[in-house]
Amino acid sequence: MLHRLPHNGAAGGFCSSDPFRLQVSTSWELFQGGGNRVSAAKSSLLGTIPQNLQTLAWTGPAAAKRFDITRQVWAFPDPAMQGFQNQVPDQTPPTSRRLVAVVVTHNRLDKLGPTIDRLLASGPSHLSAIVIVDNASTDDTADWLATQTNPRLDIVTSKVNLGGAGGFETGMRHAVARHDPDWLVVMDDDARPLPGALAAFHALPPENWDAIAAAVYFPDGRICEMNRPSRNPFWHWRLFLRTFRKGRNGFHIAHDEYAKDGCEIDVTSFVGFFVSRRALGMAGYPDGRLFLYGDDGLYTLGLTRAGGRIAFLPQIAFEHDFTTFGGSGAAKGQRFRPLWKVYYHHRNLLLLYRMAAGWLFWPVLLIVLPKWFSKVRHHSGSRRAFLRLMGRAIADGLFNHLDVSHETILRMTGPEGDQGDGPSG
């Protein structure tokens, strides 16, 4: 199929400003059961694909995988397919963009190792350096990093746990001062580009956007909901009305956008987020005082408010091996692990709502607070601690208190709370 994006914006702000002048892309599904089968109609697409790529198309596992071919760059949203990455020739011409990655880690060496390996699989022409912020890890992370000799690795060690927000602020400032990049790409230690993602970034036309959000998947290929970008419904009245009918699906981009060519967004996460130097000049750096959660939403919404243009481009794909939400049965996916994350999630979400909603913040608050407190039912065995953290989060969010120490939050959590690791602790 031959796609040409509309010029000068489209209804609702989607697919604006012709980010890809002309692009050839093909997608299909391999379905489980009975071997690898595709319809006769779709098999005609093979005429447009080089012979070496046709072979790969038919030898993958029969497990409902989606493949995107964009200028012969492949993205595999499943670990089982990653072995093919070295068999696919990289025909993307190098660009003059100097790209530097920033990765924040804390006590997750099992996640960090695969992420660094994946990043280093891209050559220096696609990734100049990798800044790793070790957020005062107490496991074997520091020892492992000390053994790494690749000259593209630049390790920044913090003596205290700065949280994900503090880590990103520190890492981004360091990357700019030390490496003078044209673009940064940021991610947690449990997130990494899928094969071909950085090549797809470099294949983009020069600087049509100030920042770019990748499509983020779980390792099994499902869309990672927490990393689904969105528009601000309070700036787009049609989306505002749709949000009343559909909830979060009213303002988050639709799932079918992941199979299209891209669209303009207002808010996204720091997983596969590419930010230009021009954007840094407009929005500055993330606020490290936020510690964890919401720093990405507040930063990207602030960038949009400052006049920056952010694109969601699913041709660039990342995976996120995400484990914060646990539980089983009715509580599956609803329980915070570790429990202290309840505080940061809700405090910072209040700040985000205030920035997004403006004068409508107070009516919105009357809607969201009952929903938040209802989450206590998913925290059997730690409900008192949940309510303590939630109450403090709401008070600090309303009064913009961002200087609460992490140690204070851990003491509030007490022995009821689950323990866990991540970029923050």
Image (cartoon, rainbow, N blue to C red):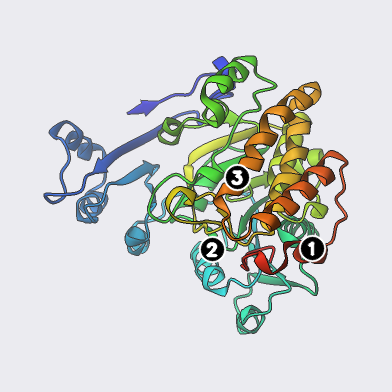
What residue does disc 1 label? 406
Query: Which of the 4 image quarters holds residue 288?
Result: bottom right
The local secondary structure at tag 2 comes to helix
Q: Is residue 245 above or below residue 228?
A: above
Q: Which mark is residue 375?
A: 3
Q: Is residue 257 left or right of residue 209?
A: left
> Cβ–Cβ below 8 Å for labels 1 and 3?
no
The x and y percentages for residue 122 are 51, 61
Q: Earlier in the sequence, mark 1 or mark 3?
A: 3
In depth, the one of 400 and 224 nearer the eye is 400
Query: Which of the 4 image quarters holds residue 357?
Result: top right
C-alpha separation, residue under disc 2 versus residue under disc 1: 31 Å
**Pair 1/3: label in front:** 3
Q: Earlier in the sequence, mark 2 or mark 1?
A: 2
The x and y percentages for residue 371 are 63, 36
What residue does disc 2 label? 119
